[in-house]
């Protein structure tokens, strides 16, 4: 197809501003799905995406559009909105020439609206501001137009007004996409250069690679090569996305589609990689490729040890569709055999946990999430540690470093003081504050990633009654005072409850954990001490009282020495029992430690 009739665009926005709903209206306009088969969030294929109202995997769809007797092809790439999946967003953006910057008429410009705009501008995309939800009574269209001009530096008069829910303004939006987004450019006669912006696994046909062709063309029978690992495959099928896969004989310059080449695992196909022809390779790959690196780590164990193999198979199957998930075998004295997993962020961890429980029917326990610390040893060696079990002896450590983030928070001014206090509690350093207008302020903080993991986002939303928005990016490593916090139950350390924490916060964290375990561990026949320790120093303690039988019940009056004698005898028996008694830890004890709210 001629490139002048092709338009490639994506929709970028903050979470819950209506990306998936707008995509639904495009699909309905093009009659790609019969009305009786249509369902909301049709591009979101996972149940979790529908329930939470979020997009986790980027999706593409080809929309035909007839104008003045000419058929145009509009290739829409729907992107995730959450900060955990920002690399997927960047690859989707780089496969387009234009972007619809969607802004909620009731919420206005928020943190990820800004970060996604900057990402789109870095790729020289044509930006179309779109104000959504204009049908709502609380919509402030003039206020949002002012924000578009003041905060984003875009022309407010070029903003399109739509309601993705009712379909109002869709005709004008489609016209604007054709008029204002430039057609793709590229060398149709040159060697093939195609960007992989996503992939998914089909159990019958192998890996389905989602590509955007920048130069050349590809068709079944061609032998392709992946630039990063030089692996070559023969193309079995090419096609475009019409909700389902629709086969075509060729994919040409400027087109977005898929190809099948008998690839067995998704890990061989990396997002951001360049596809070229094996017998006529391009001289240089497309820019921007990098490995997606995990930043949050946690160990997953089956509640029932007999489900270990089922958990292994579940993770392997998830890995087929989620190349960002990494895992290796792990073991714990308390929880048995499991897997140490790496995730892109806390949302990614929650999604993997839910999918394991739903899709594979597994009951699992996760250890406390941790980040990857960089440790410089006295012998000059440098190691990375994300598991408390691997933490070296403190006498061997010269210094430790932890990952830092640059956090962008946009909030109404009335909550500014409380949010600044929260950020300071989380060891944040303020690096900027800008008043976007009299009612809203943008604040920039540099803070440790480990402080954001547990309860920062929940507290931020609670303090601001849901109005503050949050976005972050990693900025490197900085020195920190790190200690390993051990939890001892009946004098024995429980490795699955160990954590790496900032020294100043170790005591409060230890007290919280000990209090929670006090409520969760059942009483035994003997007294059980629960202790938090750093090395040999005990910094917190709670004691579970023993279950006692009333041995003096049979004494009716008489000399007090008779009662004392019975109580001393009971005491001796309890001592012997403690020497041989083991404490059973219920699974709820491990789960209680992971709760975010501190009592």
Image (cartoon, rainbow, N blue to C red):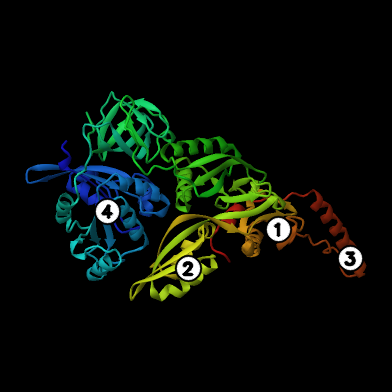
Q: Do the CB atoms of the residues marked 3 and 1 lie less than 8 Å apart? A: no
Q: Which residue is mark 2?
A: 430
Nearer the observer: mark 4 or 2; the answer is 2
Mark 3 or mark 2: which comes first in sequence? 2
Nearer the observer: mark 3 or 1; the answer is 1
Q: Which residue is mark 4?
A: 21
Label 2 packing within 10 angstroms: few (<14), some (14-19), many (20+): some
Label 1: which secondary element: strand
Q: Looking at the image, can residue 150 be seen?
A: yes
Q: Is residue 43 left or right of residue 31?
A: right
Cα distance in 3D space between marks 3 and 4: 76 Å
Label 3 packing within 10 angstroms: few (<14), some (14-19), many (20+): few
Nearer the observer: mark 3 or 4; the answer is 4
Q: Residue at x 28, y 32 (%)?
A: 192
Q: Which mark is residue 135?
A: none
Q: Which mark is residue 564?
A: 3
Q: Is residue 45 left or right of residue 171?
A: right
Mark 4 or mark 2: which comes first in sequence? 4
Cα distance in 3D space between marks 1 and 4: 51 Å
Q: Is residue 336 left or right of residue 341?
A: right
Q: Looking at the image, can residue 542 be seen?
A: no
- Which residue occupies the foreground of this view, 531 or 10? 10
Q: Is residue 452 left or right of residue 161?
A: right
Mark 3 or mark 1: which comes first in sequence? 1
Q: Residue at x 27, y 58 (%)?
A: 102
Nearer the observer: mark 1 or 4; the answer is 1
Mark 3 or mark 4: which comes first in sequence? 4
Q: Which mark is residue 533?
A: 1
Nearer the observer: mark 3 or 2; the answer is 2
- Asked if residue 27 is positioned above or below residue 413 in the image, the reply reads above
């Amino acid at each position: 197809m001629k490139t002048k009739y092709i338009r490639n665009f994506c929709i970028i926005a903050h979470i819950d501003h209506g990306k998936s709903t707008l995509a639904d209206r495009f699909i309905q306009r093009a009659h790609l799905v019969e009305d009786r088969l249509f369902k909301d969030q049709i591009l979101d294929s996972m149940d979790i995406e529908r329930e939470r109202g979020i997009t986790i995997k980027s999706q593409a769809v080809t929309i035909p559009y007839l104008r003045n007797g000419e058929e145009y092809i509009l290739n829409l790439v729907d992107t995730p909105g959450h900060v955990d999946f920002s690399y997927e967003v960047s690859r989707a953006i780089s496969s387009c020439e234009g972007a619809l910057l969607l802004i909620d008429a009731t919420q206005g410009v928020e943190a990820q609206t800004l970060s996604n705009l900057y990402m789109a501008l870095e790729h020289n995309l044509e930006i179309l501001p779109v104000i959504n939800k204009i049908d709502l009574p609380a919509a402030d269209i003039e206020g949002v137009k002012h924000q578009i001009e003041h905060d984003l530096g875009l022309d407010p008069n070029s903003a399109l007004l739509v309601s993705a829910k009712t379909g109002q303004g869709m005709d004008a939006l489609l016209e604007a996409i054709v008029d204002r987004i430039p057609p793709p450019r590229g060398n149709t006669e040159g060697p093939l250069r195609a960007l992989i912006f996503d992939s998914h696994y089909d159990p019958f046909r192998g890996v389905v690679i989602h590509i955007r062709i920048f130069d050349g063309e590809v068709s079944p029978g061609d032998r392709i090569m992946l630039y990063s690992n030089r692996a070559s495959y023969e193309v079995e099928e090419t096609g475009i996305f019409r909700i389902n896969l629709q086969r075509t004989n060729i994919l040409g310059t400027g087109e977005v589609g898929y190809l099948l080449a008998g690839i067995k695992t998704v890990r061989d196909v990396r997002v951001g990689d360049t596809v070229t022809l094996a017998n006529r390779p391009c001289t240089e790959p497309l820019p921007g490729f990098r490995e997606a690196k995990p930043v949050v780590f946690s160990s997953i164990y089956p509640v029932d040890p007999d489900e270990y193999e089922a958990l292994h198979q579940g993770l392997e199957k998830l890995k087929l569709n989620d190349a960002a998930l990494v895992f290796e075998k792990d073991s714990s004295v308390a929880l048995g055999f499991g897997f140490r997993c790496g995730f892109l962020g806390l949302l990614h961890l929650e999604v993997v946990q839910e999918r394991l429980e739903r899709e594979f029917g597994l009951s699992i326990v996760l250890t406390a999430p941790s980040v990857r610390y960089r440790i410089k040893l006295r012998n000059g060696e440098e190691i990375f540690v994300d598991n408390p079990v691997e933490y070296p002896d403190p006498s061997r450590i010269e210094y430790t470093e932890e990952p830092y983030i640059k956090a962008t928070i946009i909030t109404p001014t009335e909550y500014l003081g409380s949010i600044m206090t929260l950020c300071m509690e989380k060891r944040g350093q303020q690096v900027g504050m800008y008043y976007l207008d009299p009612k809203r302020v943008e604040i920039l903080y540099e803070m440790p990633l480990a402080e954001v993991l547990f309860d920062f986002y929940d507290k931020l939303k609670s303090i601001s009654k849901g109005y503050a928005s949050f976005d972050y990016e990693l900025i490197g490593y900085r020195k920190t005072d790190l200690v390993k916090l051990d939890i001892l139950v009946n004098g024995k350390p429980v490795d699955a409850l160990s954590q790496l924490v900032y020294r100043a916060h170790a005591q409060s964290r230890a007290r919280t954990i000990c209090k929670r375990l006090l409520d969760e561990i059942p009483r035994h026949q003997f007294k059980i001490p629960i202790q938090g320790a750093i090395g040999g120093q005990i910094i917190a303690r709670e004691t579970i009282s023993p279950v006692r039988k009333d041995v003096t019940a049979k004494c009716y009056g008489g000399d007090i020495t008779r009662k004392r004698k019975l109580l001393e005898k009971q005491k001796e028996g309890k001592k012997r029992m403690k020497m041989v008694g083991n404490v059973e830890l219920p699974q709820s004890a491990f789960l209680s430690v992971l709760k975010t709210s501190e009592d």
